[in-house]
Image (cartoon, rainbow, N blue to C red):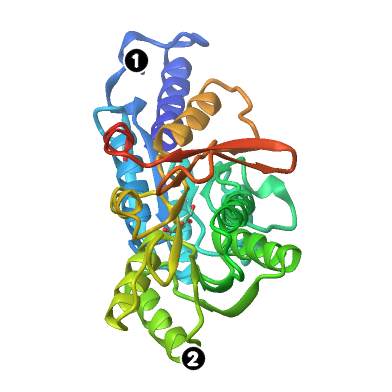
Amino acid sequence: MKKKFLAKVLSVMMAAALLTGCGGGGSKDTDTAGGSSDVITVGFSQVGAESDWRTANSESMKSTFSEENGYKLIFDDAQQKQENQITAIRNFIQQEVDYIVLAPATESGWDSVLQEAKDADIPVIIVDRMIDVSNDSLYTAWVGSDFKLEGQKACEWLKAYAASKDMKEINIVDIQGTIGSSAQIGRTEALNEAVEANGWNLLAQQTGEFTQAKGQEVMESMLKQHDNINVVYCENDNEAFGAIDAIEAAGKKVGPDGDILVMSFDTTKAGITDTLSGKIILNTECNPLHGPRVEEIIKKLENNETPDKQAYVDEGIFAHGADVDKVTVNGTDYTVTEVTEDVINGRAY
Ligand code: GZL
């Protein structure tokens, strides 16, 4: 790895200078140009493999930080456990990586291990979800989504759609993401505020842990407790897939002409395909392709430039049908894209 190699080169050059009595420059044989010394080692602590979104995110990181691109990527899958991420970061420090990239499972609990990385002079880049630390000098840069805005866009769409369809009441349940993750915090907060503002009936709220199995289990339970659900707010596509299975197994129909509207986030390939069919009525984008964005930050740091401390990704809204063409959140208009075959074929993931 670059850090260690450079240290060795400097000691060889100093020894050579002492032996030959000449300072600086060094002799030909200490030339450090090219070779594996230029490889940048990146330690990446990934949340897990809980969803299609996460798979696309991991693929983006692996294809960006490849050997042919001049990197050595040490990839660790934490199986959605923060303690595994903390262990991985400590291992990266031991291995003296050049950069640590963290996709944090949850927002809190990072101060101590990030202080250890700072003490080891290893820059930490946060990707996707946010962290809540006492001092933001504990990380160099963050790139990810505005999860509350995602939720606000989705809820504004529901408000407009309900008006266009003259829906008398919204009896909604929320299958939440991993509790304490920024994605869950933001999407849930947006819904809670919209329920309050619009007089919707929030019948139940429970985590589906961003997985299809848990999403199905939670939906089954909610259907047993409430027979008047007409909207399900799934905080990611995999929960939506599970919820749809549960709804159909209960003999109810999803979609614009059915009993229950299913809303989702992520716009993964399978999710946007369900949006084309109407099984998912609205899918708010959460873009997983963070590899190039993280590389841009690393390239800036390699050139001794200062990257933006925080960078938000622009994201769209994708609907079944064209009932609502735009939504407005905090004074900003966002176009709603009707999902067609062409839209699906034109997407990068
Ligand atoms: C959002 C990401 C969430 C996705 C889920 O950026 O953290 O985690 O919405 C994933 O699919 O599991």
Q: Is residue 122 visible?
A: no
Image quadrant of ligand 1?
bottom left
Q: Would you place residue 334 above or below residue 100 in this image?
A: above
Q: Amino acid at mark 1?
A: Ala
Q: Amino acid at mark 2?
A: Gln
Label 2: element kind: helix
Q: Residue at x 42, y 40 (%)?
A: 338
Q: Would you place residue 28 above or below residue 9 in this image?
A: above
| Quadrant in which the N terminus appears | top left
Residue that label 2 marks: 225
Q: Residue at x 51, y 58 (%)?
A: 104
Label 1: element kind: loop
Q: Position of residue 144 (x, y in %)?
A: 54, 44
Which of the numbered marks, if any, corresponds to residue 175? none
Number of marks in the rendered image: 2
Q: Residues within 10 Å of mark 1 (few under 14, many from 20)?
A: few
Residue that label 1 marks: 33
